[in-house]
Amino acid sequence: MSQPSVSTSAWQDAIFNVFKKGNVRQIAYVPDAGHSQVIRRAIADPDIEDIVLTTEEEGVALASGAWLGGQRAVLLMQSSGVGNCVNMFSLLQSADIPFFTLVTMRGEYAEFNPWQGPMGRATQAVLELMGIHVLRVSTPEEAEEIVSAGFDAAFEAGDKVAVLLGQKLIGRKKWERK
Amino acid sequence: MNQQTSPRVNRREFVARLLASVPDALVVTGLGSAAYDVYAAGDRDGNYYLWGAMGGAAPLGLGLALAQPDKPVVVITGDGEQLMGIGSLATIGAKQPRNLTIVVLDNGHFGETGMQRSHASLGTDLVAVAKGFGIAQAFSVDSLTGCDELTRRVQIRHGVTFAQVFIEADEPPRVLPPRDGPFIKNRFRSALGLTPF
């Protein structure tokens, strides 16, 4: 797939800077184009461990382990991955562990792939059913502020927070190969 | 293959011997019998018992090992729990945390739910799986003497280690660790000198 122009956009840099300023030491991810710049910067940063996961629920457990060991971790995933996490989210409630995840949305705006629809439209409700507070970024201008607000709620107040990055924000996926 | 006729070790004796030899290790247990074994060996502030989150013990251990690189981290779980989170061995293989040891107590069965046979006694070779995921130090143990080599590897922290421990498929008396997740979390963090937010 060709890389969309948003991959180098300023709002993704702003998000990484929130993590960096917030002393995030582990960034776990199942990749998505909307996370690509943050992932690249995590890999390039010697003070941050980048952890590629085989499935998203590993990231919930990993972030909990990081917190037990005194580090802040964040999980990057696509909306489809939220479904993979459901039972593992129990850990956050049962042990009351601060948690922050950034979720790129599919199935909600100019979606080309119908298979993204069911989970994409259930994503927010699934997160809320599992006790996770949901915020949403819809425009590039608000990305830094909302991510920062959610991040602080997680690590300053111990909340469990997901920030959804709207599909309109990320931009239309280009399906043709160059 | 994991045949019931092959040599096997008593799970409680093995876990007690391992933990007695690594007093400074941070220990994460999978849910069920593995948690009871670790608790039966003596409760410690550095023990983190899971009561759910099946499949989460190994990735939780990875996050902890990356956060505490100077301490040995030992995940003790069962074959069923590890199988549910089997992909996490690939994630661990990619990161190669030097201080992480994964101990799978393998009776080839789902012990908590009525001793149904698991994949580990139906064809899966967990050591081969771990090696295939890039964990070179992967081996099986079937005796108490094998515990001493495992202990040495935990202590030296010279690379991620995976040990499949063939245990007897018995059900020793349940001894239940605390189920109060926030208590266990706060006790664990406090032992590491971490303060509440």
Image (cartoon, rainbow, N blue to C red):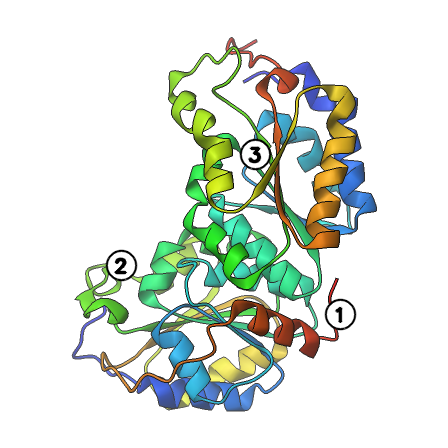
Q: Nearer the viewer, residue A45 or B137?
A: A45
Residue B63, given in percent of the width and then of the height, sits at: 60, 59
Residue beneath the point at 75% across and 41% down: A44
The answer to whether the residue labelled 2 contacts the one labelled 1, judged by CB atoms less than 8 Å apart, is: no
Q: The numbered mark 1 sits on a residue in which chain?
A: B
Disc on res. B195? 1
Dot 2: few (<14), some (14–19), or many (≥20) neighbours within 10 Å? some
Say yes or no: labels 3 and 1 on the same chain. no
Q: Is residue B154 visible?
A: yes
Please indicate whether residue A27 sits to the left or right of residue B84 in the image: right
Up the image or down, B30 lies above or below A87; here it is: below
- Residue at 58% x, 12% y is A172
Q: Residue at x 60, y 81 (%)?
A: B45
Q: Which residue is mark 3?
A: A31
Choose the circle earlier in sequence order: 2 or 1: 2
Residue matched to label 2: B124
| Percent of width and height locating residue A94 | 50, 61
Q: Nearer the viewer, mark 2 or mark 1?
A: 1
**Distance from Cα at disc 2 to Cα at disc 3:** 29 Å
Q: Quick one: label 3, few (<14), some, or many (20+) residues within 10 Å?
A: some
Q: Chain of mark 3?
A: A
**Amino acid type for the residue under numbered disc 2:** Thr
